[in-house]
Image: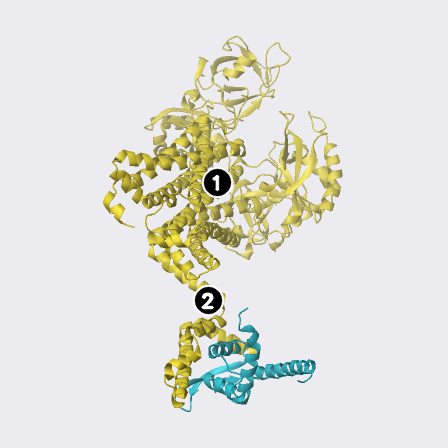
Chain colours: A cyan, B yellow
């Protein structure tokens, strides 16, 4: 068990969500998460690629090299059907947990 | 679905890690460039640096990515293997020594395994459910020593009749206990084969079915009328009939009778014994008595054995109890009822049963143990060599530990090395097993037939298992050494402490090698001495120089013809250069004899010798004693071809006429009312049939023409060196005067007696062979360990030399230490040998397993080897230049 495991689940979910909209390369994924959360969530960039590798191993995303808008070769990640299914399930879990916490905290 | 994507990805990374690493590298670089670009656009001062800082440690990222993927353990194994392979290639001599040594030990064991498997474990082929088939044994008290029992499969027919009464008729398989060799004439060819006589139930019990034709029918199964039909084995069918289906129903000649082939047995069935049986004929063919004696099935000749099938142990028990009672109810003439004998069963594999084992088989079992000892020695040796190497690599291992390799990881790498070595040794072992296997087959039990090649599935599995275990054991020593390595002091290097020159593990391995070598040497010495003792047994005749010539024909009895031409043959033979004496006899010495009753005039009873009342005799020609080297002690030889009188042996003379000379006395032969024949001479004692007889029988010789007992064996006396040449000449001569003789056998007495001496010859040869092997391995081991230990102490040696030590002082020092280890080994070995002596005691002859002479010689040999192996490193150490040794690290 490594120290990133606890955050790994959440990070995986965020990455999958990002990719469920469109295929992006690693840098773009990081930017997207940072922008969408208005700077609150900043992915430690060193842990992004290991996370992507993990997703690749589990077959939740696939990767392919393609030309980026800046005419350079970049590795694009695409979510798979299994990835989508897992995302759905993780989102449900997350919602349930968040609701429970909110209830306890009295929505404050 | 996801599984496939993921799996494919991992496979790709596994098979091409370098290119994937480059991809990840590109990806990270791309990321950094973008980040840099963004920061520059945002007006950062040092965009590159900031980008890097933002990203974190790329090396860490790379490592993490790498760690995530692939089958990590597989990756590690691949790494370890390539590293090990490189390491082995760097020191090819060392590697070769280890691989060969270990391969030798493993190969010899694999070969012995095949052999022992065949003799003790593997059931005969072509039989259904062989574990249910059991041999019946008669467990009885030995006739001449009341306190010993033996179990034998050989039974008398009247007993078997009782057994058959109790069981279903189809459940008792009867067969002859020994196979006889026959010559079959198929068309124009004559083929040799071995034959068993059996009843139809024999095949039923074994579950063997005919491939062609049928087995015996009820008429042929009757024992009182002889029917000449035969069943042949599949292999004989192929060999002699070229697999022609017309073989069934054809008529062949066996001996001098026409025999009809009625069936071919299923493939793979060759009888139930170690030697192959290819012909089966009905039991009614067992008829060796002249027509005047009672029918053979009512006589008490021992020549049959019984097999039965018992599906459960319960069924067996239920049969054995009443069967034993029935057995004990059979009255044996001149003996009465045997109330202490009982029936028991044993497995189909006879060697594993309760019967007395063949001496050769017992020796083979001991040799299996010897092979194991050799393996242990080679493992100890190789462990030592690897340990020495590991010590040399101490610094390399320390460095690896220092940069963070876990002990487990280093262990794994060292074990991989050992495993690789063991695997290579295994390959060598397989090759060796095939070669040694064929060698063993011709030496050990040559009459055994081998159903498969020297290497079959079971041996393969054994070899694999042994290789794995060997690899594991061999890797232990260096692994444990690496475990205990102190990182700091190894890295420091510097003056090697004297402590590193000694190592408990090394000494222990050395001592155990020496001890085991002593055990083998003692074993070899005991067997060699036994062989010498057996060889030097005096059987009366001159075994080395006596040659017998026997002429025979496949289809007819040549006795009368041979006897007719014998005088001419004897004349011719005497003229052959190198022949010192010529004679003839009814049978070759110790190959046969006749027996009669003898009576003394005026006395009712006669002395018994060796428990028997009759006496053995042989019809010989004058000059027989000179030709066979039997010393004439008193009186004279026979005068002419029909001389009256008999010549007795020494102990017969002593027993029958104690205190007086036998010459001049007379005996009555055969019938009480017959003439009293004078004793004209006394010769030295002889053995009757075997080299190992302890008691003498009563023996005498006659020289009389007797149409029932023709002198048809020609005997020559010649120097062994000329035997081959003489054999050729006499064979041609015999065939010239006797064209009908299709076979002329010329053999020295030594060859005739060879099978009896084989077990000791075997033991001596193989024990000595393996002992020498072990000695070489041990010598190499001692040398390498002492050489290494001494090389570690070059500093110390340098100082000693600088302080004035001479060559002999250094030599004494090094050799002394070597001898100490070897000495401890010798001591341990002697103790081990004394303890294990019990295991071979029954196989020795004329020597106890504690014979001091053998032990002393073994200790001396090993001591000399130890000194020799230590001297070379000692001399090298003495030549060290003190100044350069003190300077170097």
Q: Is residue B418 above or below residue B60?
A: above
Horizontally, is B726 left or right of A34 in the view? Answer: left
Instruction: For mark 2, give the secondary structure.
Output: helix
Instruction: For mark 1, give the secondary structure.
Output: helix
- Camera-side residue of B848 and B252: B848
Q: Position of residue B52 (x, y in %)?
A: 40, 79
Q: Can residue B236 be seen in the rendering of this structure?
A: yes
Residue located beneath label 1 in the image = B370
- Camera-side residue of B800 and B826: B800
* Residue B300 disc label: none
* Residue B75 disc label: 2
Q: Is residue B855 above or below residue B464?
A: above
Q: Position of residue B754 (x, y in %)?
A: 46, 33
CB within 8 Å, label 2 to label 1: no
| Disc 1 packing (10 Å; few <14; some 14–19; many ≥20) | many
Q: Quadrant of residue B90?
A: bottom left
- Camera-side residue of B404 and B260: B404
Horizontally, is B201 left or right of B508 in the view? Answer: right
User: Which chain letter matches label 1?
Assistant: B
User: Which chain letter matches label 2?
Assistant: B
Q: Position of residue A17 (x, y in %)?
A: 56, 85
Q: Quadrant of residue B860?
A: top left
Q: Quadrant of residue B571?
A: top left
Which of label 2 and label 1 is nearer to you? 2
- Camera-side residue of B639 and B379: B379
Which quarter of the rendered picture does the N terminus of chain B lie within? Answer: bottom right
Residue found at the far bottom of this picture: A69
Residue at horizontal 30%, vertical 39%?
B874
The disc, 2 or 1, on the residue closer to the chain's N-terminal end is 2
Marks 2 and 1, how far apart in space? 41 Å
């Amino acid at each position: 068990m490594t120290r990133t495991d606890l955050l790994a689940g959440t990070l995986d979910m965020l990455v999958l969500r990002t990719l469920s909209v469109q295929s992006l390369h690693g840098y773009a994924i990081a930017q997207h998460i940072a922008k969408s959360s208005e700077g609150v969530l900043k992915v430690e960039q060193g842990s992004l690629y290991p996370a992507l590798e993990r997703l690749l191993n589990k077959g939740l995303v696939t990767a392919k090299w393609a030309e980026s808008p800046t005419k350079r070769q970049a590795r694009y990640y695409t979510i798979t059907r299994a990835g989508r299914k897992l995302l759905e399930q993780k989102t449900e879990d997350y919602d349930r947990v968040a609701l429970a916490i909110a209830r306890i905290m009295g929505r404050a | 679905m996801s599984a496939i994507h993921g799996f494919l990805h991992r496979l790709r990374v596994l098979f091409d890690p370098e290119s994937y690493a480059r991809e990840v590298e590109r990806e990270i670089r791309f990321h950094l460039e973008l980040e840099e670009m963004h920061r520059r656009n945002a007006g950062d001062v040092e965009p590159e640096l900031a980008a890097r800082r933002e990203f974190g440690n790329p090396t860490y990222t790379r490592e993490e990515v790498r760690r995530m993927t692939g089958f990590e353990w597989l990756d590690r194994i691949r790494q370890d293997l390539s590293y090990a392979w490189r390491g082995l290639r760097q020191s090819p001599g060392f590697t070769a020594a280890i691989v060969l040594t270990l391969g030798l030990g493993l190969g010899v064991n694999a070969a012995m395994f095949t052999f022992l498997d065949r003799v003790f474990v593997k059931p005969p082929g072509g039989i259904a459910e062989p574990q249910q088939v059991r041999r019946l044994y008669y467990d009885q008290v030995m006739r001449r020593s009341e306190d010993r029992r033996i179990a034998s499969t050989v039974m008398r027919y009247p007993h078997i009749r009782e057994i058959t009464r109790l069981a279903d008729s189809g459940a008792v398989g009867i067969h002859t206990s020994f196979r006889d060799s026959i010559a079959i004439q198929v068309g124009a060819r004559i083929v040799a084969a071995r034959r068993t006589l059996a009843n139809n139930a024999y095949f039923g019990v074994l579950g063997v079915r005919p491939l062609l034709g049928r087995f015996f029918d009820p008429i042929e199964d009757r024992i009182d009328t002889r029917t000449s039909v035969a069943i042949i084995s599949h292999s004989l069918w192929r060999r002699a009939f070229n697999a022609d289906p017309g073989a069934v129903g054809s008529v062949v000649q066996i001996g001098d009778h026409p025999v009809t082939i009625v069936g071919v047995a299923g493939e793979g069935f060759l009888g139930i014994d170690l030697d192959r049986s290819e012909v089966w004929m009905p039991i009614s063919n067992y008829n060796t008595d002249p027509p005047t004696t009672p029918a053979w099935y009512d006589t008490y000749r021992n020549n049959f054995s019984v097999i039965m099938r018992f599906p459960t142990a319960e069924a067996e028990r239920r049969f054995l109890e009443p069967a034993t009672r029935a057995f004990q109810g059979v009255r044996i003439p001149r003996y009465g009822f045997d109330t202490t004998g009982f029936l028991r069963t044993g497995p189909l594999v006879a060697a594993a049963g309760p019967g007395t084992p063949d001496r050769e088989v017992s020796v083979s079992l001991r040799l299996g143990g010897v092979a194991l000892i050799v393996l242990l020695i080679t493992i100890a040796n190789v462990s030592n060599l690897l340990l020495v190497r590991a010590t040399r690599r101490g610094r390399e291992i320390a460095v690896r530990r220092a940069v963070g390799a876990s002990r487990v990881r280093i262990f794994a790498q060292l074990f991989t090395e050992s495993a690789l070595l063991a695997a290579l040794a295994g390959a060598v072992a397989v090759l060796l097993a095939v070669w040694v296997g064929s060698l063993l087959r011709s030496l050990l039990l040559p009459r055994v037939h081998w159903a498969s090649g020297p290497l079959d599935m079971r041996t393969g599995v054994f070899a694999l298992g042994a290789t794995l275990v060997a690899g594991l054991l061999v890797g232990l020593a260096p692994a444990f050494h690496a475990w205990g390595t102190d990182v700091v002091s190894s890295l420091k290097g510097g003056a090697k402490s004297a402590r590193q020159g000694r190592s408990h593990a090394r000494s222990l391995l050395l001592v155990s090698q020496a001890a085991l070598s002593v055990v083998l040497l003692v074993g070899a010495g005991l067997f060699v001495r036994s062989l010498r003792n057996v060889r030097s047994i005096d059987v009366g005749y001159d075994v080395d120089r006596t040659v017998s010539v026997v002429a025979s024909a496949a289809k007819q009895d040549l006795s009368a013809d041979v006897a007719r031409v014998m005088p001419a043959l004897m004349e011719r033979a005497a003229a052959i250069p190198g022949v010192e004496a010529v004679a003839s006899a009814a049978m070759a010495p110790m190959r046969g004899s006749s027996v009669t009753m003898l009576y003394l005039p005026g006395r009712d009873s006669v002395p018994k010798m060796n428990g028997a009342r009759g006496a053995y005799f042989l019809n010989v020609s004058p000059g027989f004693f000179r030709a066979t080297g039997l010393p004439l002690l008193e009186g004279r030889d026979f005068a002419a071809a029909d001389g009256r009188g008999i010549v007795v042996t020494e102990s017969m003379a002593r027993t029958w006429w104690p205190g007086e000379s036998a010459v001049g006395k007379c005996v009555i032969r055969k019938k009480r009312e017959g003439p009293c024949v004078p004793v004209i001479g006394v010769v030295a004692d002889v053995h009757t049939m075997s080299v190992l007889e302890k008691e003498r029988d009563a023996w005498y010789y006659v020289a009389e023409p007797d149409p029932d007992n023709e002198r048809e064996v020609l005997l020559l006396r010649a120097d062994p060196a000329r035997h081959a040449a003489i054999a050729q000449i006499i064979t041609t001569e015999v065939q010239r005067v006797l064209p009908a003789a299709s076979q002329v056998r010329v053999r020295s007495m030594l060859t005739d007696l060879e099978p009896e001496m084989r077990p000791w010859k075997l033991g001596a040869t193989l024990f000595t062979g393996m002992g020498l092997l072990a000695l070489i391995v041990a010598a190499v081991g001692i040398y390498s360990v002492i050489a290494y230990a001494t090389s570690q102490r070059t500093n110390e040696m340098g100082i000693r030399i600088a302080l004035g030590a001479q060559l002999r002082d250094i030599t004494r020092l090094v050799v002394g230490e070597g001898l100490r280890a070897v000495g401890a080994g010798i001591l341990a070995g002697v103790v081990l040998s004394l303890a294990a002596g019990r295991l071979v005691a029954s196989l020795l002859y004329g020597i106890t397993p504690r014979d001091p002479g053998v032990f002393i010689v073994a200790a001396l040999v090993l001591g000399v080897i130890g000194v020799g192996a230590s001297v070379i490193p000692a001399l090298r150490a003495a030549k060290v230049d003190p100044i350069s040794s003190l300077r170097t690290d």
